Amino acid sequence: MHSATHPYAGLFIVLEGGEGAGKTTQMGAIATWLEESGWLAKLRASDIDPPLLLTREPGGTPLGQGLRQLLLHSDLEIDPLAELLLYAADRAQHVATCIRPQLQRGGIVLCDRYTASTVAYQGYGRGLDLQIIEHINRIATGGLGADVVLWLDLPVGVGLARTQQRGIADRFEQTAVAFHERVRQGFMALAQQGSDRWQRIDAHQPLDQVSKAIQDCLAAHLHRWFETLKKRLTGGDRDLP
Ligand code: Z5A
């Protein structure tokens, strides 16, 4: 499971999904659960500091915050290819300055959206060539993939109704429902590729049930990963497979 996605000692967890799926809410719940169930204390005891990095795309770095503002909240017209490259620039900076260093330290990264969002939104949503997207994703990440992808799935109408209650809509929330249906199909297609790293979570349930499903899934990964981490730390080897 672990060595196929990146060579580092840390654990890379990504939340994916359409609008209003509950990713931001569940990021907070996962962080609380990791603290309360003692996982972060175990990492601190192994001198991993910080034990957990909570981050997101776009906008996980100072450069990314500027790009996020342009991408989601400006009135500028953005061509789909330019949009793809701006997400790639955000990701390249994020991987280089935040994600990779945290994984090299042996810590956990919990990230709201990553490469699958580009496939779903720019590929299935905007209709850009999927091979080009895969290539650009590989360039931006240097091939660094997530260990666990939690896909929070729910009907498009339910997710959009949740976000509409918030008031001001961003660039994507103003887009037609058909676009969001294609995005969901994109996530579905990725999930159906059969990777054991992907886990579909039914996000159309009460909050605590979604949290419980996520915890059940993560617990198994965390136990396996921590056993490997301990061996690597004993061998003084955080960076190599
Ligand atoms: N994008 C892209 O096109 N290409 C890329 O490569 C990347 C991103 C990386 C990021 O915006 C946008 O960038 C995104 C895709 C595009 N599209 N948009 N918009 P963002 O980060 O601001 O938006 P988001 O990721 O979609 O976040 P969101 O709309 O806030 O959704 P969420 O984080 O998944 O949901 P939430 O904020 O946790 O919950 C939404 C509301 O629902 C909130 O009031 C909750 O209290 C409520 N909620 C949550 N869970 C439940 C349950 N279980 N029951 C009832 N109510 C719930």
Image: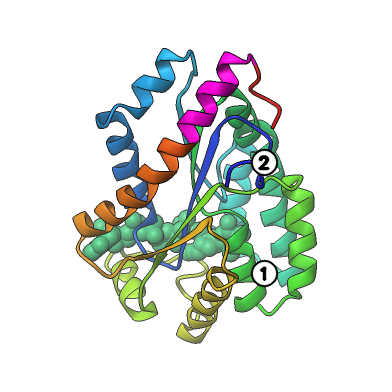
Q: Where is residue 207 in the image (x, y as percent from the top left)?
A: 22, 58
**Going 69% across and 32% down the picture, which residue do you hit?**
241
The location of residue 93, given as percent across then percent down, is 69, 40
Q: Which sits in the foreground, 105 or 65? A: 105
Using the rendered image of the protein, determine whether residue 117 is visible from the camera's viewpoint: yes
Residue appearing at x 78%, y 70% in the figure: 131
Residue 27 relative to residue 191: left or right: left
Location of residue 179 in the rendering, given as x and y in whole percent from the top left corner: 53, 81
Q: What element carries label 2?
A: loop
Residue that mark 1 sits on = 77
Looking at the rendered image, the disc whose residue lies closer to the viewer, 1 or 2, is 2
Is 141 a magenta residue?
A: no
Q: How far apart are marks 1 and 2 (CA)?
A: 36 Å
Q: Could you tell me what secondary structure mostly forms the magenta stretch?
A: helix
Front one among 197 and 67: 197
Look at label 2 and name its amino acid: His
Q: Quick one: 225 or 204, which is closer to the camera?
A: 225
Q: Reply above or below: 10 against 122.
A: above
Q: State the mark number for residue 6.
A: 2
- Tell me, yes or no, if residue 74 can be seen here: no
Q: Decide: marks 1, 2 in contact (CB < 8 A)?
A: no
In the rendered image, residue 234 lying in the magenta stretch gets the answer: yes
Residue interval drawn in magenta: 225-236
Location of residue 152 in the rendering, given as x and y in whole percent from the top left corner: 40, 63
Q: Which amino acid does label 1 sit on?
A: Glu
Rate crowding at label 1 as few (under 14), some (14 to 19) or many (20 or more) other CA atoms within 10 Å. Answer: few
Mark positioned earlier in the residue sequence (1 or 2): 2
Residue 202 appears left or right of 12: left
As displayed, is residue 7 above or below residue 14?
A: above
Ligand 1 rendered quadrant: bottom left
